[in-house]
Structures are given as C-alpha cells and as structure tokens.
Amino acid sequence: MVLEFLKANNNFGMRIEISREEELLDTGGGLKKAAYFFLGDSRASNEPFVLHNVDVISTIDLGRMVESHTENRARATLAVQDRATARPLLFDEHLQLCGRGVGSRWKN
C-alpha cells in the first residue's frame, strides 16, 4: 500500500528509496541493511537528506525539522519521542545527544 501511495503521488517530487524487510530487523537493523545507500559520496550534494524510520504513525513536521537543522547548521538532527524504554537516549542541557542508558525501564 505504501508503494502504491508513493507511486500515485509521484513520490511527492522526491527520490524515495524503499528497503524491504522480509524478516523484521528492529530499529537499527533496517538502517544497517540499507547501509549501501549511505556509503555514497554525500559531499557531492548540499541537499538535505531526511531519513524517517518509524514503526508508528507520525505527524512530525519534517519541513520544520529541516528548517531547524539548516538554521542551526547542524551536522545531524534527530527527532525522538519521550516514552518509557529500557534503552533511552540521553541528552545534555543543550539537547545534544550524549549517550544511551541501559537497564531497567526509564521515563525521561
């Protein structure tokens, strides 16, 4: 259905790559499987690269996220959701990613 939707909307004028998972690969497994895509020479383009990797419905404003990324001249921008998890991402007072927690379930 996703492929049909994208085709019907001409990929919204973007280059969109789909990496199928015959066996579910969890959060990072899908990205690892698609590593070949990221290994090209990304310096050849100044265009923003947006990766949307979720297994839930998202209403994030990707356009605003790209604007913020550009305004802050960030090397990378990561959108996360505050939720209970056994593997939380840890951020410092400037919202810079500084690690990952492990162990019992946390609520940040």
Image: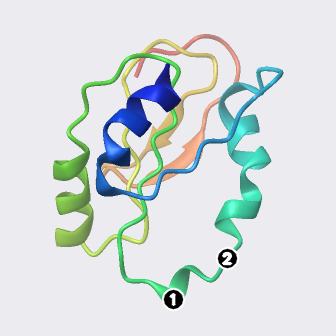
Q: CA distance from mark 1 to mark 2?
A: 9 Å
Residue 90 placement (x, y as % from top left)? 49, 39
What's the residue at 26%, 45% (across, down)?
Answer: 62
- Tags 1 and 2 in contact by the CB under 8 Å rule? yes
Query: Looking at the picture, which amino acid does disc 2 mark?
Result: Gly
Residue 35: % across, % down? 74, 57
Q: Is residue 17 above or below residue 61?
A: below
Q: Is residue 80 among the parts visible in the rendering?
A: no
- Residue at x 72% of width, y 25% of height: 26
Q: Quadrant of the C terminus?
A: top left
Q: Secondary structure at mark 1?
A: helix
Left or right of 45 on screen, residue 106: right
Which residue is denoted by mark 2 in the rendering?
A: 40
Residue 21 image point, x, y percent: 75, 29
Observer-nearest of 17 and 69: 17
- Identity, as a three-letter code, of the amino acid under mark 1: Ala
| Nearer the observer, 61 or 97 | 61
Which residue does the image show at 48% across and 51% down from the upper left?
16
- Front position in the image: 63 or 3: 3
Q: Quadrant of residue 20?
A: top right
Q: Nearer the viewer, residue 8 or 54?
A: 8
Say which mark, if any, is on residue 44: 1
Q: Which mark is residue 13?
A: none
* Secondary structure under the numbered disc 2 in the rendered image: loop
